[in-house]
């Protein structure tokens, strides 16, 4: 491929990784970030705000994740005296760790292929 590229341009390989089910996208880098923010902040609303995302979009993503998972990945508690909140479950944390490792392997693949091709 080296011979096919113009010498005055810089090229790089790029790609995105996600996991799909029959019905929908299950996990991707955006959902990983959302789970990470919920885990850190204890709130879907605060996580959405930190990401510049609407609460509805964040809620829809969490609903989709929970619907496709064998057990809930995020548990929610409605408001009251202490207010509402959200908690990433052990299964949710496991998914976060596994997807992060998969993402790191994918990025290493991209780097290796770029070195090989360019």
Image (cartoon, helix red, strand yellow):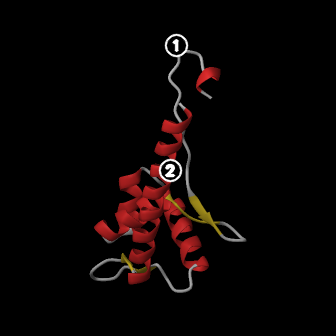
* Residue 117, quarter of the rendered image: top right
Residue at numbered disc 1: 8
Residue at left 51%, top 46%? 110
Front residue (pair 113, 75) = 113
Mark earlier in primary sequence (2, 1): 1
* Residue 57, quarter of the rendered image: bottom right
* Badge 1 element: loop
Residue 79 horizontal side relative to residue 82, left or right: right
Q: Residue furthest bottom?
A: 71
27 above or below 113? below
Residue at numbered disc 2: 109
Residue 77 appearing in the image = no
Residue at left 59%, top 64%? 19
43 above or below 72? above
Residue at left 41%, top 59%? 33
| Relative image position of residue 84 (x, y in whole percent) | 35, 77
């Amino acid at each position: 491929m080296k011979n096919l590229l113009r010498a005055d341009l810089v090229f790089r390989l790029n790609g995105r990784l996600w996991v799909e089910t029959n019905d929908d996208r299950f996990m991707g880098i955006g959902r990983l970030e959302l789970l990470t923010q919920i885990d850190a902040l204890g709130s879907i609303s605060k996580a959405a705000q930190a990401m510049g995302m609407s609460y509805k979009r964040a809620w829809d993503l969490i609903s989709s994740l929970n619907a496709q998972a064998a057990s809930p990945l995020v548990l929610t508690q409605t408001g009251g005296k202490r207010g509402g909140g959200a908690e990433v479950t052990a299964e949710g944390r496991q998914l976060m760790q596994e997807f992060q490792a998969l993402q790191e392997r994918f990025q290493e693949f991209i780097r290796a292929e770029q070195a090989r091709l360019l």
